[in-house]
Amino acid sequence: MKAAVIYQRGELPQYTDFPEPVVKNDGQLLITMKAAAIKHFDKGTASGRHYSAGKEQQNGTVIGGDGVGLLDDGTKVFALGISGMIAEKAVIDKRRMVRLPEGIDDIAACALPNAVAGSAMALRFRANIKSGETVLINGATGFTGKIAVQIAKYYGAKKIIVTGRNEETLKSLLTLGADQTISVMQTNEQFIEQLKVIHNDTPIDIIVDYLWGHTAELILSCLKGHGSFTHKTRFVSIGSITGDTIQLSSEVLRSVDLQLSGSGLGSWTKGEMEQLISEILPEMFQLLAHDKLKVDTISVNLKDIEKLWEMEVSDGKRLVVTM
């Protein structure tokens, strides 16, 4: 079969022939792949930079962690891969697949799940979102941030504030459910002043953070109390696009009712992961099939993987490989 294969960490994937994966037990299935998205997670695991990256295989590793494919009977499914998914064939775990609704687009369907995991899991299980709450999404102009805006709205957020670098993309989030924008291109003083005004007017219940780094420091500093009772805020770290570490004053933690947590592989319980597969993803696929979730994608063919691996995808789009 043809596949995207990496033979050494840090190298570009190669479009090449590779042995078809083999089903090893009754809990596995072989599927014919239709499409697989290229995410930061895939690039991080392929390069060895992501904390979940396993050992590289001596004879090469097929890349891609999930995608859309067909079972032997023609049923279309989204699944997490046991073998690499950017290939013509892949082996999946029966317990980690979702049958897709009729008429759903392959490219959109494979682009959505990682963003759902990167937003709905945080909102549902770490922030315990309730209808009527105010949500701040830090770094909302990326693909997952755009999905987070829509899911927060779907889950009942009354007000959604978004931050980002690209002014045009920030404005476009207003059409997806955001109520107010904050540019990270302002001075620190301007950013802090704008956020404090918002927080004083409508206390922020939940912060979903994809950036970490300096903006997270600024946001946390805005929450600092002055010895009186404070509004409880749940801050959930999901990504670290602008830096993996921050400086956090202990006075912030002592002066405000703050819940600080993270959402990602390793932080979810087994039960939460099962809910993602059995409940959350099927619900989101139905919304997508009925045009109630908007996704922006760029599709490329498997044979072009070598020259497109480092392709810069802007404006919150997701790069998808078709087989």
Image (cartoon, grey):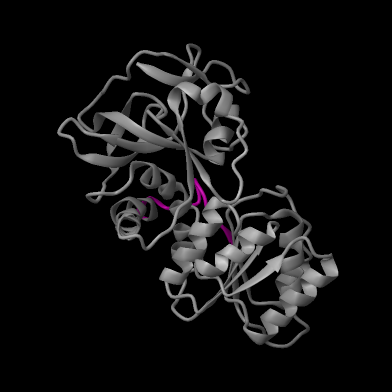
Task: Describe residue 295's horizontal placement relative to residue 290 as left or right.
Answer: right
| Residue at image point 36% right, 13% down | 19
Task: Describe residue 146's horizontal placement relative to residue 226 as left or right.
Answer: left
Q: Quadrant of residue 87?
A: top left
In the picture, the quarter occupied by the C terminus is top left
| Residue at image point 67% right, 83% down | 230
Residue 295 magenta: no
In the rendering, at what x and y percent does residue 8 appear?
58, 17
Task: Describe residue 137's horizontal placement relative to residue 28 as left or right.
Answer: right
In the rendering, at what x and y percent does residue 67 appear?
37, 37
Q: Quadrant of residue 178?
A: bottom right
192 to 57, vertically: above or below: below
Residue 261 magenta: yes
39 to 212, vertically: above or below: above
Task: Describe residue 80's horizontal placement relative to residue 54 as left or right.
Answer: left
| Residue at image point 73% right, 50% down | 245
| Residue at image point 51% right, 25% down | 305
Segment tinted magenta in the rendering: 260-271
